[in-house]
């Protein structure tokens, strides 16, 4: 009997982080606010909401805020929907994967 190796779930890619202060104490810092142009996944909110609704209709969770701000989660959900979704979902997932890939590379400002 063979056992399939199961990967652990990825951790969120963004969120609070600890910083050390000059006096030696530690504080929790919430990341700065993002404009829609700075979101990790460059997709319209309406597309992410539609994707989430289609996923829910097929019995799978997809949280809109995590899709917009967590690259690892978004990539996993889009890939899953593309592979196993039915109806309109795989096509929308392919469109969102293109947005996800396009936002991976940030231009270097000189």
Image (cartoon, helix red, strand yellow):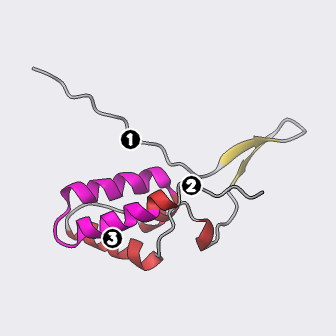
Return the residue at label 3.
Answer: 51
Circle 1 or circle 2, nearest the eye: 2
Q: CA distance from mark 2 to mark 3?
A: 23 Å
3, above or below 94, in the image: above
In the image: residue 27, left or right of residue 87 = right
Q: For mark 2, give the secondary structure.
A: loop
For the point 31% across and 61% down, the residue is 61
Residue 65 location (% of width, % of height): 48, 66
Return the residue at label 1.
Answer: 9
Extent of the magenta region: 70-99
Q: CA distance from mark 1 to mark 2?
A: 24 Å
For the point 61% across and 57% down, the residue is 106
Query: Mark 1, residues whose alpha carbon is within 10 Å: few (<14), some, or many (≥20)?
Result: few
Circle 2 or circle 3, nearest the eye: 2
> Is 57 inside the magenta-drawn segment?
no
Q: Main secondary structure of the magenta part?
A: helix
For the point 78% across and 57% down, the residue is 110
Q: Which numbered tag is attached to residue 46?
A: none
Return the residue at label 2.
Answer: 105
């Amino acid at each position: 009997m063979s056992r399939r190796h199961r990967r652990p779930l990825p951790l969120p890619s963004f969120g609070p982080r600890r910083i050390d202060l000059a006096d030696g104490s530690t504080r929790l810092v919430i990341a700065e606010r993002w404009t829609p142009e700075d979101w990790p996944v460059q997709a319209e909110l309406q597309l992410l909401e539609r994707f989430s609704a289609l996923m829910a209709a097929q019995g799978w969770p997809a949280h809109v805020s995590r899709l917009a701000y967590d690259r690892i989660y978004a990539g996993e959900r889009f890939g899953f929907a593309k592979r196993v979704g039915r109806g309109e979902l795989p096509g929308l997932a392919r469109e969102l994967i293109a947005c996800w890939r396009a936002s991976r590379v940030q231009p270097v400002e000189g």
